[in-house]
Image (tube, grey):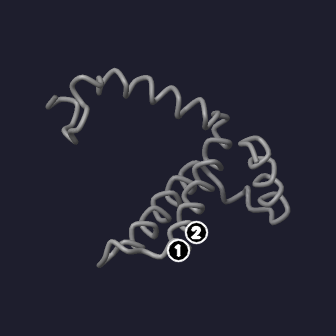
Amino acid sequence: MGTEETLRKLRAFVEAREWDQFHTPENLAKSISIEAGELLECFQWNDEAKFESIASELADVLTYCLLLSDKLSLNPMELVLSKLEKTELKYPVDKARGTSNKYDRL
């Protein structure tokens, strides 16, 4: 399933429940943060989180990210590719390979 088909299904889901009225950019951004916290909670106290829990929480994060990008009329795949181009410049392979240092410390 591609991004457009996924967005169509998300839009239909939201419309059927009349939830768009609650989906302001601010509320969607808050929801992304909340769900990201729940994703992180899967790893609390150990590194061996249950795959099903991780997948479920990651789906929640991605759902809200897609809803926010749609609300703002932004193409999520274009956003990722554009950011990747900028990040490639900040982290050239010859300096960044094998290190987790921030770009200003390379």
Work out which residue is located at the far bottom of the displayed protein and give it. Answer: 45
Residue at (48, 76) in percent of width and height = 50
Residue 34 is situated, as x and y percent measured from the top left of the image, at: 47, 65
Asked where in the image residue 90 lies, by quadrant, the reply is top left
Report the amino acid beneath label 2.
Ser
- Numbered badge on residue 53: 1
Q: Residues within 10 Å of mark 2 (few under 14, many from 20)?
A: some
Whole-angstrom CA distance, mark 2 to mark 1, is 5 Å
Measured from the top left, where is residue 28 in percent x and y?
Answer: 57, 54
In contact (CB < 8 Å): disc 2 and disc 1: yes
Q: Residues within 10 Å of mark 1 (few under 14, many from 20)?
A: some
Q: Nearer the viewer, residue 28 or 45?
A: 45
According to the picture, the residue beneath numbered tag 2 turns out to be 56
Name the spot of residue 65 as percent of width and height, x first. Answer: 57, 50
Image quarter (top left, top right, bottom left or bottom right) of the C terminus: top left
Residue 99 horizontal side relative to residue 83, left or right: left
Q: Which residue type carries mark 1? A: Ser
Against 103, is 65 above or below? below
Query: As displayed, is residue 87 above or below residue 35?
Result: above
Residue 53 in the image: state x and y as whole percent: 52, 74
